[in-house]
Amino acid sequence: MLDAYHPKQVEAAWYAWWEKEKFFHANPENVLNGSKKPYVMVIPPPNVTGALHLGHALMLSIEDSIMRWRRMSGYEVLWLPGCDHAGIATQSVVEKQLWKKEQKTRHDLGREAFVNSVWEWKEEYGGRINNQFRRMGISVDWDRFAFTLDEKNSKAVTEAFCNFYEKGLVYRTTRLVNWSCHLRTALSDLEVEHLDIKGKTFLPVPGHDPKKTYEFGTLTEFKYRVKGTDKLITVATTRLETMLGDVAVAVHSEDPRYKDFVGKELEHPFCPDRKIVVITDDVLVDMNYGTGAVKITPAHDPNDNLCGKRHNLEFINMLDETGQINHVGGEKFAGMMRFDARVAIYEELKKLGLIGEKYPNPMRLGRCSKSNDIIEPLLKPQWYVNCKGMAKRSVDAVRNKELIITPESHEKTWFDWLENIQDWCISRQLWWGHRIPVYLVTIPGIIDNPDKNNNDHWVVGRTKEEAVQNAVKKFNVPADKISLDQDEDVLDTWFSSGLFPFSTMGWPDNDTLDMKAFFPGDLLETGYDILFFWVARMVMMSLELTDKLPFKTVFLHPMVRDEEGGKMSKSKGNVIDPLEVMDSCNLDVLLKKLYESNLSEKEVKKNVVQKQKDFPNGIPECGTDALRFALLSYMVQSSINLDVKRVVGYREFCNKLWNIVKFGMSNFPADFVSSPEGVKGCKLSLADQWILGKLDLLI
């Protein structure tokens, strides 16, 4: 044996041998013939947006410990690995790189060429992730590796959509969506991050002049003139640019200040032909907030949208998909980016004597988690899934203890979300993902100019041929009269991920060996941050499509955060690659990765300073075992603020274990096992003490 523990030498060649001997391959015949009980878990498929970070390393360490133990206990273990195509995240990363390297957008390339470039990117980074999987030593069945855009999973996605549509659960309608003007796509509520600002704050906005910052967190007053008079009514807004879409001003019916204004028509300073009337709406208006008069923009605000429906108001959209003011803004503002228009409108109102006071206003600002764009509520036609029935079954399953969530404290959030669930917007205006299997119909003399907003002009089909036949039945015309154009949109990434426990087993073909032997599964282990993104959707979709729960138990591990408690995120630059800890990494390499990243110049500078402070000499070689020991030792905590220096301490711990094996307990420090400070000031977890005790017995 070596004189001491040297991770690379100790770990070398083991994994290649394990894989070659297929020690982790699950045989369905052993289950079907009754010789073994199955134990099944699918890996939470990481996004193909780059390298794994230490949060993934924790997940893999926990899951590998569980699955190896089950395998040693005599089960036929299937631990299925995979990778997620991550529509928005992947497209965003590739677009950033395309612009950085070639100063081109995806529209410059065209859809086919751009998608091909994303596939090339996926092959490079998907392989990198799988290498990290192997370096972590995880005992997964590589023969069953799944990618959410592969043929098997794509077939399941198409079937699931058509199944939902045929049941009346999928429908198309026009509603306010969370719109990212920078990415030009709708986002679900769960994909929107919220930034709490206390008052006047200046922020950069993607798609705008990178040298400028824009003001948020203020309430600006401006005035509308009562038509044909000198009377003015003052309103206040945090989004001045949306006044270009105003259709009314609402006041409270009991507010004496505005009794004489109700029913009067107002003049719009920039849209003279616009009819704006003062209405009463006691649901919306708080007499004690602002001026007590509220501008109503039904096409750009959720509360105004409901008010518009109550009063049958006009819905006027004043923005295009890129965030530019459209023709509604007239010659003065049309073509301006929305926040440049905010500044210009303020100045014009000031010239007209219609601007009022401006006050600091604490507020929550919705931001796109992938691009940091400011979310814009926008009226757009989208495809939705009615989730209410599925959600109720999922709630009942947990209440009845058919599905166990541990720690149990997460049950409350499960119930709160599912019992108040909104219909799921599943369409995304992207090019990377599963194209939605719906087709717009053209029939000469019947539908000459198909309308995307008209549900009757769409047909669904598992293939284009099936869609043609469905159109023949729907419109009672010969097939040769029908022209079909497939919807440009793709499905939300979580739609395909929600099928992962059974699409990977061969569903919708229920007679595959894997479906018979390994579905439903036993355990789902993941971070609590994707309880709604992924876990709830897997449960809902499985119950609806297979009438079975996808697993029996959900185990939620703590979040891995940086040393200061911040969430590890590629967009923040505070992630650490497990390989950097296992193999060592000098400071120059750590800094080079920052400079080559897609981070903004400001974020790069901030993270360079932090890396120089944390790792002045780089990260020393720790090995896989030390990393896994260190991560698992944190599991007694509800949140993990990871200090890499603690991992270095476990490198010494592994060296001491090596000495136990080599020399026996007689040469091992007598106080090490009993001391709570066994590893350079790092307290030993109960799991570590148990391991030491077992080794003592074995020796």
Image (spheres, rainbow, N blue to C red):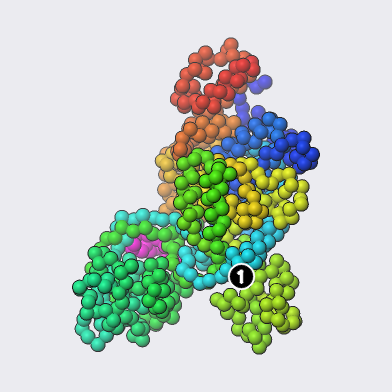
User: Of residues 198 and 414, which is closer to you in this image?
Assistant: 414
Query: In the image, 384: left or right of 365?
Result: right
Query: In the image, 670: left or right of 146?
Result: left
Q: Is residue 520 visible?
A: yes
The quadrant in which the C terminus is found is top right
Q: Is residue 597 visible?
A: no
Query: In the image, 93: left or right of 509?
Result: left
Could you say whether the residue bearing mark 1 is in a helix, strand or loop?
loop
Q: Quadrant of residue 250?
A: bottom left
Identify which residue is drawn at 43% across, 49% down: 605
**Residue beneath disc 1:** 488
Identify which residue is drawn at 55% across, 76% down: 453
Q: Position of residue 325 (x, y in %)?
A: 42, 75
Q: Main secondary structure of the magenta part?
A: loop
Task: Classify mark 1: residues with Cα within 10 Å, few (<14), some (14-19) or many (20+).
Answer: some
Question: How many discs mark residues in the rendered view?
Answer: 1
Q: Amino acid at mark 1?
A: Glu
Identify which residue is drawn at 62% across, 45% down: 551
Q: Which residues are magenta?
A: 200-216
Q: Quadrant of residue 404?
A: top right
The quadrant in which the N terminus is found is top right
Q: Quadrant of residue 25?
A: top right
Where 85 sits versus 455, above or below? above
